[in-house]
Image (cartoon, rainbow, N blue to C red):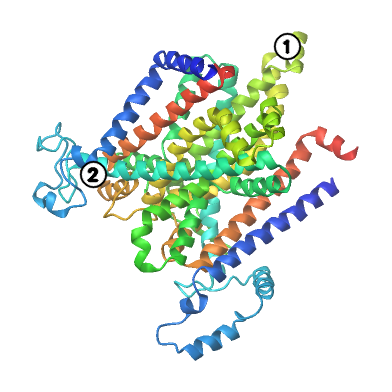
């Protein structure tokens, strides 16, 4: 167990180093940092002095080590566009994106898992067929179109929900949360559904496929023959064994949620990291782009590490294999 | 011979699948309309002199106050909606097809070589593929676009916009092709005909592309259709986000972005008609992809 976790930790460190290297290469080779930082009036001599001061003439490896060291100490450099520290800019935006992502994931699980189980148990039913047809459309309709449709229906036609921004937020120790006001929740609903729909279809299809596979297995047939009540059979014996792949996709979906939050945030003008990333691309604000990548990779690695540990906690077979 | 039998079987399946027929009709209609846009369209949306502000904001013909000349109405500049959409679909399809072609050539070559040579080359290619698979395609495409913006001088930015976009999409979609080509190549490697060709001393390039390639074409065709749909969606998303094509050469995504401004006013057609076209195009290509998968994978039937 400890060995397994240690191995995964070391792998994670390497992934983070690779991403940091990518961010550093972006900063160093896409455009010249000095021309970005100085104005037209700056003399060539001044530019050269600045270059020397910032250590941009040092060997590549030295620069990369310094870059990584700075990052570890929370120094992420300055934005070309706003001249603010990137660390602050990103930190301000993290709560919005994370809250949106978490609610979207919850929606996809709370709706997707039961729907998957149901369509697996009654594959030929009318309800199942309807659900499956709907998800087929859900996969083909782009995220931004779903967002526009929701805005049009609930925001413009019915006028029930706000269509942009985060609504009322509450500061809790520097974390700006919209979980504690009615207004905040109202603003959160539409973006979270938009972001959750695509993940929901994936969750449902996976749970369905897995559940059908399990239902065909010998131990289920044996349990049926032994007269285990159907309810107990479905929810205890079968569902427990479909949980492993479900947990895996939560880990994988997290990346998708973060990426598609760029689109959702743009449709709903949600002030999260995705919107910041889009702005930084539009203005070629390389430091912000690089740090966004590093932060996203960090969350991704963290979630997958937790998922790996959950495996061991949930599936006793893995513990046995590990001990042997 | 086998190919011939398979083709007849495909025709039979196609005739008996109403969904596939409808999808094919929709896709072909849009593709033809887009391909012949300069001859079919009423006005040239890029040519300011071909339309007039006085015809602005006309609704589709079935609504009150419409001009029968413009079947689906006009936008605020007086551009005929059908013409804008046909030209937009033309760009969307061009970028989608070009991106898919580049992704296919790149992915299949790398996958074939990885499966054929194995060893270190295989390991490197597959590691890169793994890393990229963890990143969603849209993030990769945005990143490549951002890098291109930083690297290219400003004066040629606009001219190269279409190609930058195409390349960004192609580089985020090659992985599927590489993985499939590699897996199929590994299966073919054990077959006698490949071993015979190797023993006869044929050049690896010839074995890969003349002998192995035709035998792995089936699964690749399925991915090509599905990825064409992905490429079109990706382009639409990027253009919608304002990262893709500018408003003076609009693709379907740009048209939807422009239409968003009319979401709160009554001119619904400026937003919803391009959206409907985009969704119809993508859904029909996806249905055709599903159909092809059934044809090439008899186990699923």
- Determine whether, in the image, residue B34 is placed left or right of residue B299: left
The residue nearer to you, when weighing A168 against A215, is A215
- B199 vs B205: above or below: above
Residue at 69% of width from left, 75% of height from top? A62
Q: Quadrant of residue B160?
A: bottom left
Residue B104, given in percent of the width and then of the height, sits at 51, 41
The residue nearer to you, when weighing B217 against A38, is B217
Quadrant showing the C terminus of chain A: top right
Secondary structure beneath label 2: helix
Q: Residues within 10 Å of mark 1 (few under 14, many from 20)?
A: few
Could you tell me how far apart the alpha carbons at marks 1 and 2 are, in whole angstroms?
61 Å
The residue nearer to you, when weighing A181 against A205, is A205
**Chain letter, disc 2 residue:** B
- A276 vs A179: above or below: below
**Chain letter, disc 1 residue:** A
Residue A245, given in percent of the width and then of the height, sits at 67, 34
Quadrant showing the N terminus of chain A: top right
Residue A189, given in percent of the width and then of the height, sits at 45, 44
- Determine whether, in the image, residue A100 is placed left or right of residue B119: left
- A297 vs B89: above or below: below
Q: Which residue is mark 2?
A: B84
Q: Which residue is mark 1?
A: A224
- Determine whether, in the image, residue B41 is placed left or right of residue A70: left
Q: Nearer the viewer, mark 1 or mark 2?
A: 2
């Amino acid at each position: 167990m400890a060995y397994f976790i240690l191995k995964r930790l070391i792998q994670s460190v390497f992934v983070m180093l690779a991403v940091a290297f990518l961010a550093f290469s972006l900063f160093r080779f896409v455009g010249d940092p000095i021309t970005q930082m100085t104005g037209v009036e700056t003399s060539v001599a001044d530019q050269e002095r600045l270059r020397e001061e910032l250590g941009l003439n040092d060997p590549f490896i030295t620069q990369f080590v310094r870059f990584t060291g700075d990052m570890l100490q929370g120094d992420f450099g300055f934005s070309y566009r706003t001249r603010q520290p990137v660390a602050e800019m990103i930190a301000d935006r993290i709560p919005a994106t994370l809250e949106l992502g978490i609610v979207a994931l919850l929606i996809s699980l709370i709706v997707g898992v039961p729907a998957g189980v149901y369509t697996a148990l009654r594959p030929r039913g009318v309800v199942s067929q309807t659900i499956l047809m709907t998800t087929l459309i859900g996969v083909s309709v782009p995220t931004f179109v779903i967002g526009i449709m929701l805005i049009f229906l609930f925001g413009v036609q019915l006028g029930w929900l706000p269509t942009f921004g985060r609504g009322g937020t509450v500061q809790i120790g520097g974390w700006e949360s919209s979980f504690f006001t009615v207004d905040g929740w109202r603003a959160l609903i539409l973006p979270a559904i938009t972001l959750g729909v695509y993940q929901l279809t994936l969750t449902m299809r996976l749970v369905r496929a897995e559940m059908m596979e399990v239902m065909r297995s010998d131990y289920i047939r044996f349990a049926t023959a032994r007269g285990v009540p159907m309810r107990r059979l479905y929810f205890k014996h079968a569902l427990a064994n479909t949980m492993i792949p479900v947990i895996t996709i939560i880990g994988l979906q997290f990346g998708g949620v973060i990426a598609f939050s760029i689109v959702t945030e743009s449709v709903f003008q949600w002030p999260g990291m995705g919107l910041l990333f889009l702005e930084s691309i539009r203005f070629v604000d390389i430091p912000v782009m690089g740090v966004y990548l590093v932060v996203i990779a960090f969350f991704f690695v963290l979630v997958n590490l937790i998922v790996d540990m959950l495996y061991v906690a949930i599936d006793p077979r893995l513990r046995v294999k590990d001990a042997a | 011979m086998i190919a011939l039998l398979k083709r007849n079987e495909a025709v039979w399946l196609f005739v008996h699948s109403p969904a596939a027929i409808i999808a094919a009709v929709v896709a072909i209609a849009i593709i033809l309309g887009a391909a012949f846009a300069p001859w079919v369209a009423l006005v040239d949306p890029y040519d300011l002199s071909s339309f007039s502000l006085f015809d602005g904001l006309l609704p589709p013909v079935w609504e009150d106050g419409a001009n029968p000349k413009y079947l689906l109405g006009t936008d605020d500049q007086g551009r005929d909606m059908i013409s804008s959409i046909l030209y937009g679909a033309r760009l969307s399809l061009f970028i989608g097809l070009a991106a898919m072609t580049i992704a296919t050539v790149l992915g299949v070559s790398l996958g074939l070589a990885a499966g054929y040579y194995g060893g270190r080359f295989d390991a490197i290619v597959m590691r890169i593929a793994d890393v990229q698979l963890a990143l969603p395609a849209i993030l990769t495409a945005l990143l490549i676009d951002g890098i291109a913006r930083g690297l290219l001088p400003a004066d040629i930015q606009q001219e190269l916009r279409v190609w930058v976009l195409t390349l960004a999409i192609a580089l985020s979609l090659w992985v599927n092709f590489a993985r499939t080509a590699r897996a199929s190549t590994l299966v073919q490697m054990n077959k006698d005909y490949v071993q015979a060709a190797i023993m006869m001393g044929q050049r690896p390039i010839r074995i890969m592309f003349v002998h192995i390639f035709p035998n792995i074409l089936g699964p690749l065709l399925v991915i090509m259709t599905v990825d064409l749909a992905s490429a079109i969606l990706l382009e639409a998303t990027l253009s919608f986000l304002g990262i893709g094509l500018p408003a003076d050469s609009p693709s379907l995504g740009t048209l939807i972005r422009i239409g968003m401004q009319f979401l709160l006013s009554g001119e619904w057609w400026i937003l919803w008609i391009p959206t409907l076209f985009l969704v119809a195009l993508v859904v029909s290509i996806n249905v055709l992809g599903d159909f092809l998968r059934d044809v090439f994978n008899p186990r699923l039937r």
